[in-house]
Image: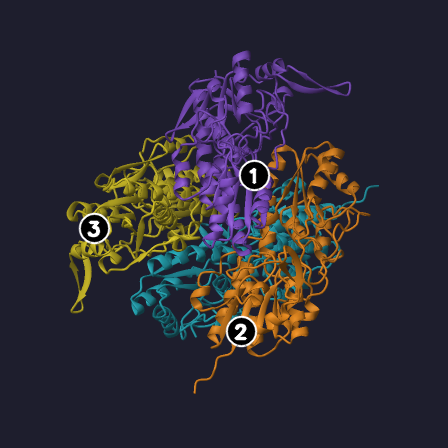
Chain colours: A purple, B orange, C cyan, D yellow
Amino acid sequence: MEQKKRRFAVLTGGGDCPGLNAVIRAVVKTFLQNDCEVYGVLNGFNGLINDNLKLMDYAAVSGILPRGGTILGTTNRDNPFHFAVEENGELVYKDMREKVIENLRKYDIEALVVIGGDGSLNIGAELARECDIKVVGVPKTIDNDLPCTERTFGFDTAMAMATEALDRLHTTAESHHRVMVLEVMGRYAGWIALHSGIAGGADVILLPEIPYKLEPVIAKIQARKAAGKNFSIVVVAEGARPEGGEMSIARMVEGSFEPIRLGGAGEKVAQAIEEQTGIESRCTVLGYLQRGGSPTAFDRVLSTRYGVAAAEACLRREYNVMVSLYHDQIVTVFIQKAASKPRQVPVDSEIIRTGRQLGLCFGD
Amino acid sequence: MEQKKRRFAVLTGGGDCPGLNAVIRAVVKTFLQNDCEVYGVLNGFNGLINDNLKLMDYAAVSGILPRGGTILGTTNRDNPFHFAVEENGELVYKDMREKVIENLRKYDIEALVVIGGDGSLNIGAELARECDIKVVGVPKTIDNDLPCTERTFGFDTAMAMATEALDRLHTTAESHHRVMVLEVMGRYAGWIALHSGIAGGADVILLPEIPYKLEPVIAKIQARKAAGKNFSIVVVAEGARPEGGEMSIARMVEGSFEPIRLGGAGEKVAQAIEEQTGIESRCTVLGYLQRGGSPTAFDRVLSTRYGVAAAEACLRREYNVMVSLYHDQIVTVFIQKAASKPRQVPVDSEIIRTGRQLGLCFGD
Amino acid sequence: MEQKKRRFAVLTGGGDCPGLNAVIRAVVKTFLQNDCEVYGVLNGFNGLINDNLKLMDYAAVSGILPRGGTILGTTNRDNPFHFAVEENGELVYKDMREKVIENLRKYDIEALVVIGGDGSLNIGAELARECDIKVVGVPKTIDNDLPCTERTFGFDTAMAMATEALDRLHTTAESHHRVMVLEVMGRYAGWIALHSGIAGGADVILLPEIPYKLEPVIAKIQARKAAGKNFSIVVVAEGARPEGGEMSIARMVEGSFEPIRLGGAGEKVAQAIEEQTGIESRCTVLGYLQRGGSPTAFDRVLSTRYGVAAAEACLRREYNVMVSLYHDQIVTVFIQKAASKPRQVPVDSEIIRTGRQLGLCFGD
Amino acid sequence: MEQKKRRFAVLTGGGDCPGLNAVIRAVVKTFLQNDCEVYGVLNGFNGLINDNLKLMDYAAVSGILPRGGTILGTTNRDNPFHFAVEENGELVYKDMREKVIENLRKYDIEALVVIGGDGSLNIGAELARECDIKVVGVPKTIDNDLPCTERTFGFDTAMAMATEALDRLHTTAESHHRVMVLEVMGRYAGWIALHSGIAGGADVILLPEIPYKLEPVIAKIQARKAAGKNFSIVVVAEGARPEGGEMSIARMVEGSFEPIRLGGAGEKVAQAIEEQTGIESRCTVLGYLQRGGSPTAFDRVLSTRYGVAAAEACLRREYNVMVSLYHDQIVTVFIQKAASKPRQVPVDSEIIRTGRQLGLCFGD
């Protein structure tokens, strides 16, 4: 009698991130190569609630490695413990955990691979804790601010895109004797701003981790002018804030996915510089251009390693963990630990010091 | 007795544009190869007023072909006929044409190559008409809206950058079931929006040439949703406006270079779509990313052809003309004719029809 | 009673070329938008012989615009009038035109869109002439050497790739004081070599159109060295040949698609330069990297225009033509005329003169 | 009395590598910011022998961060202990160490930063050991095969370029039902082949570390064909060799820089596949395209960190070390240890296992 194959599922949750498809492909291929079956859950946790799964085969993941986005769809709203339903014309929030359990049972799914950021990983951890669902997490965010992993996939691509933007702005700044400000993503952590700023030869980098004062920023720009460089490049993380200013937004509470609109951090800096130096200053907001598009080769390799490792964890029944990069090796960590507060840039880190040695201003 | 060499000058005026350095290089090399001398005027017309010129040699233009920006610097403010000077703490506008004439005489410069958009070319034409200065123009604008030439350099690069941005937004739109709006440059003419929209597979393209109604835009997005495509891509030229709405800005009057800030055309469309369809809609403003960076191979070839042709016109003493692309040949046209009203996309052109055949919505 | 829909078919033949998918998409969407049916023929003429067609819908062409290759598959071997069949262990060539006619009738196909180079277009013309099949051609070749059209799709992408390669080689040449030779495609015509050479700042460009002598090449490199530039960049079309040398291959006879291997044109030049100047010289053969990958924005627009125009020609029953670019407009020309001898670079063209003005050496 | 400034020198040796300029810039800026003087040695060790140094200032390194190549020039031939000199028309090798010592004394240079691969670092170590010259090394090689560091700068860019090439070849392979072979650099170690192969979705990867058999390669390609995938992608490191075959070249002996030409590893594999499967197979040799061009953002950050760290080591008088990446931190290691035998891919490493889980064939 033929033995029944083990069955798994995979979903992608939260914002778009280059490398999602590469992870999906690696997860699916590893399961198939090891004689298991794997379902793709469509549109994140929504698909688990609304029974929207499809069986994956090799053809389903053929050719997706270099492509941005996720073939499974995603949403950054749907939380099974707090799920928005319209009733009598009003939105009410319901606990749908039973639906999730029911659907996973229906397909006889042994464990669930959750590819997501802090929100999705928190939900994964809660499903494990509260509903006894077996979960393996894969850390995803372009911001690189997930704790318990040295690097998330998507970050290298976002940082590369921001660097390319800085290269473009550089020529215009230099030709026009202007200050060009680039606002990049990073609400709680300035990894993109820091790395792209170093890579793009910025003169000023403002991070959420270092509340900035205007004086040193202005002084840097004027020192450059005095030295015959009448242009400057400034990188501002969207979560950068002036000293004394409150962090403009509270951390999203666990499980709550109301879209929060920041905005304006870069424009604010550009206006202040123009007013105080008299040099024309212009702000560009990179926005969604950091999230889409084909992943870099680095991110494709990292995503693939994560995907294989997540499936391998399932295969050996090591559950309720997140795969993680530690000293350039893929390891596993408890998922509860993984989804806690954001990992910020240490203000005394070597790479900040590298910037200071080059004469870069961090607004302090 | 050794004969004195003929002497020329070259300047770049107006906004940054990929290919400026390629034109400068071609102008300078052609003059040097033909045993002439050539001065670079720094910072556009400002350098002619303030005697800021430098003699160019091969080393000065070595390696600049692939680089964005302009090694000569530029400004989009300085008009010799209407030049801002601070007097007693106030800005007053003065006629500095005598300074220009004096400086050109001082260096014994026979003719001036002006690489610029409508503003700079108008000044060039006025210098020719009013001051008897010999001028050859090179048409520069990423917007491709200069009359009397089929293509300006810089346009292909801007359009390519916008297309790359659309590729990136595409994956996010599809994964998130969103409407992604990209606002691109184009105040008076929608060439960038039209070409990048076609190249990037947009569903809706809104141009200054076709005042838009929201109804067909909404209908298009809903038709796609009904057909199972719950995402859409919309390209909006910054000068696009709703039917009945006035063109939000007047054409810059000749010689006036007050910076005009448009803004908001894309965001307006995104908000209207979200309100009327309930689909999350996000706007990205491409902005300066279209102006900087290395020119495409196409633009490098075109810039080089323009630069050589401009120097050749000088060599054969054909003055007060602009070089121009006509039926894929470089020709010359009278510069007065060149710098008139913007060349818009003909609303019945083949390429608009191409879009319509593909089911694209132009908002009409 | 519902009227039967008109039915068409589309195939891609010959070598890979960026933009094929963009043309297919435009052809298919235009037919569908105009209430027709369209079949994709798989693997070029092979699919017509072996009854390998599939009905196309919107989903079939969704997302293919930016992708290289052809979703229909292609071959550069299969000729219905001279089709290789294995019989008793030997290849014999058979006339399969009846099979083609039979299959087109079977599906009730009114006309066939052939997207291909000279070989495929010749077959298309022969099918029209000999078998009374209605054909519309779309000119495809990265070499840009098809007569009766000013530009083929794929050329801009190939040229851009070659230019990017030159940018890369430039830095190595300069750092190492070397001569770097890049061999690019172009058997009969040097369009890629010429355009990429201008765009990439080459010092020497060798084309099939201008049989080269080594003396001026060596002299150019030594003159650069004497002027302190101890590196040089040389672009060689694969079909470039020394003066007096025979054109190394005969033009492929009509209908014969034996693969011809050229090779060595670049290496030969590199060795000669190293021997005669003592400067280290290295050759890179770009090869297939010119054929694959995502088309440039320019090529996507051109491909889309061609595809729509080809379908439109079918819709208005204008048959046995090829769509063509003439003075930046899409027009139609008789297909017999289209597929004749290759269009070479005119040796006295403006763009060659542009190169000479910059001091470029063409080996003459 | 003003105190004399400390003085240092920096040189680049060996083959071109993306990121060299970024390191130079970081070294020079860090010295200048710390009130030291720094000389650039031109053309590697040749400049030390022939007294070819120039004092560097901020202007000298302005704008070089994103550029490929090295502004200091390089050579991969010149060894002070074994320096080729022409005497009576013959090459004789001489010991020029006294010249080096003399020139460093002449400029009163305290220590020398050597940016180079194993050859240059070996010379650096020998200068330290034999001549009491103070040296700090920076590990450079696109091959990533230097011991005592987890990553060399230049590798990420080379790997990204190879991945881009694979993306291009993929579309052609798929459209034409071909096997496309890409030969990449890697004489002793297969890092580029392994990473780009994973990132580019290769089916077969052949490395120097795993002598290959043809049988499993052929079996993999035929299994794909049987599964309906009638194309395959093969990545071959230039140093890959069949089982039983000798490693085609001996390791370059210390200090000897005779150019060694490998060649043919990829073509050999392509021919064998075509013969044994009957599927058309084509080989592309990526060659110098991996060495030139702008470094990736990742490499720019790494290069900058290395450069700053090398200067910092000098500043704190920590000599005869090489800066190195260890667990994502920059550390220092003894330079003698650094320049020993190449670091190969461990055949049981996680990333090889990752490939095997995806069904990739490594020829064993």
Chain at numbered mark 1? A
Q: Nearer the viewer, mark 2 or mark 1?
A: 2
**Which label was assigned to residue C143?**
none
Residue B109 percent coordinates (x, y): 54, 75
Is residue C21 at all visible to an observer of this figure?
no
**Which label was assigned to residue B8?**
2
Mark 3 vs mark 2, CA separation in Å = 53 Å
The residue nearer to you, when weighing A243 against B205, is A243
Chain at numbered mark 3? D
Q: Please, what is the three-letter code of the amino acid marked with disc 1? A: Gly
> How packed is label 1: few (under 14 Cα within 10 Å), some, or many (20 or more)?
many
Q: Secondary structure at mark 1?
A: loop
Is residue B202 at all visible to an observer of this figure?
yes
> How packed is label 3: few (under 14 Cα within 10 Å), some, or many (20 or more)?
many
Q: Provide the residue designation for mark 3.
A: D255
The total number of labels drawn is 3
**Which label was assigned to residue A292?**
1
